[in-house]
Amino acid sequence: MEKEPKFKKVADGANDLSLGISMVVAVLLGVGLGILMRDAFGIPWLFWLGVFWGIAGAILNIYKAYEKQKKSLEELANDPKYRDYKAKKED
């Protein structure tokens, strides 16, 4: 059996907390990119394109976290310790 790394729980916890931070960073990067494009090309709507890209990046981060959590819960549902609970709940 392979031994878990010493700080695996800490790294997993930091990864879970980073979802909120990554959402803010994605939106700020999009806004910054929009401002740079607007100023570089002189087209005002490029700012809103950057905002859209930032929001889309934040939504993508949420989706990735959701899929990771869903996979984790599916693995837990197949764990032999919880099979009896699953059968009782269906009754």
Image (spheres, rainbow, N blue to C red):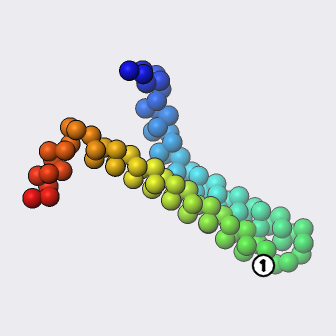
Residue occupied by mark 1? 45
State the image coordinates of residue 34 (x, y, percent, origin top left): 77, 67
Tell which of 63 and 80 is nearer to you: 80
Q: Residues within 10 Å of mark 1 (few under 14, many from 20)?
A: few
Q: Quadrant of residue 31?
A: bottom right
* Quarter of the image with the C terminus in it: bottom left
State the image coordinates of residue 72 (x, y, percent, origin top left): 38, 46
Indicate whether 38 appears above or below 20: below
Q: Secondary structure at mark 1?
A: helix
State the image coordinates of residue 15 (x, y, percent, origin top left): 51, 42
* Quarter of the image with the N terminus in it: top left
Tell which of 57 and 41 is nearer to you: 57
The single residue placed furthest to the right in the displayed view is 41
Apparent side of residue 77 relative to residue 6 in the rendered image (left or right): left
Apparent side of residue 11 relative to residue 53 in the rendered image (left or right): left
Q: Residue at x 15, y 47 (%)?
A: 85
Q: Residue at x 51, y 58 (%)?
A: 62
Q: Residue at x 46, y 54 (%)?
A: 67
Task: Name the amino acid, label 1.
Answer: Trp
Indicate whether 52 appears above or below 15: below
Apparent side of residue 46 relative to residue 76 in the rendered image (left or right): right
State the image coordinates of residue 2 (x, y, percent, origin top left): 42, 22
Q: Quadrant of residue 23?
A: bottom right
Apparent side of residue 44 relative to residue 21 in the rendered image (left or right): right
Instruction: Tell how many labels.
Output: 1
Q: Quadrant of residue 46?
A: bottom right
